[in-house]
Image (cartoon, rainbow, N blue to C red):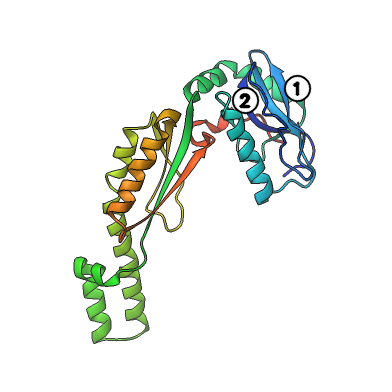
Amino acid sequence: MAGTGMYVYGIVGGAHPLPADARGVGDPPAEIRLLPAGELAVVVSAAPPGLRARRRDLMAHQDLLLELAEAGPVLPMRFGVVAPDESTVLSDVAARGGEHTAILERLDARVEMNVKVMPVQDNLAALIREDPVVRRAREEARRRPGYEANIRLGEAVSAGLRRRATAAAALLPAQCAELADEMRPGPEVEGCVLNISFLVPRRREADFRAVVERCAAAHPDRLDLRLTGPLPCYSFVVPESAPARV
């Protein structure tokens, strides 16, 4: 990533306050400021040299967005958005001012919650009892042991665990959607049978967590269920909302 220019964290309303002692990415952390853009403002800092996706900077970026969201809606940028100068940022925001304002209204008092579901990797005995495909593969491996039979058995077990997890998680999106304004499928993640994000009103966050926890408790032998949030509402902002990169 480029090491010069203006680092962009997000877009807020023109009257949005900065958190006290707000700091951004870099070492030492960059000083944050608001760049007025009509009725909006852009949260920016100097882009630090040698910027890379270090955990320290990833967390600094996310933590600042979450702090900003405590005071009102934020149109968040993904980590690493850098513009060459102020005029580029301002012209981009001016060209899309109506779009940005509409997104801020949609995100007001809402957070993103992400749910990932992975198969539980044990309890093989139950899988063999319930899954005829796995049972046949094990019987074949016993009758004709060897490398290829073991490979086929391993593949059958992996597929069977995914089927069990997928079936157990089938109702979860609909149950969560009842407490959310929107939901968006996420990119494929290795090992996941489900990766989905929800736009949840802050007042319903506890209820949302309870639904996810009940699903996990109902299927402890099938689902490894991971809930992450609150997050900045990355999944509910179109990529084109970002100012031009260097």
- The mark nearer the N terminus, 1 or 2, is 2
**Quadrant in the picture for the N terminus:** top right
From the top left corner, tell me how far across and down residue 164 is, in percent.
28, 58
Residue 121 percent coordinates (x, y): 37, 66
Quadrant where the C terminus lies?
A: top right
Q: Does 135 sit left or right of 84 as displayed? A: left
- Sort mark 2 into few (<14), some (14-19) or many (20+) by Cα contacts within 10 Å: many
Q: CA distance from mark 1 to mark 2?
A: 15 Å
- Residue 182: mark: none
Residue type, mark 2 in image: Ile
Residue that carries the numbered disc 1 in the rendered image: 87
* Residue for point 24% across, 80% down: 140
**Which residue is located at x 49 percent, y 25 percent?**
107
The residue at which mark 2 appears reads as: 11
Taking the image as drawn, is residue 53 in sight? no
Q: Quadrant of residue 243?
A: top right
Secondary structure category for the residue under label 2? strand
Say which of 11 and 221 sits in front.
221
Tally of numbered discs: 2
Q: Is residue 184 left or right of residue 232?
A: left
Q: Amino acid at mark 1?
A: Ser
Q: Nearer the viewer, mark 1 or mark 2?
A: 2
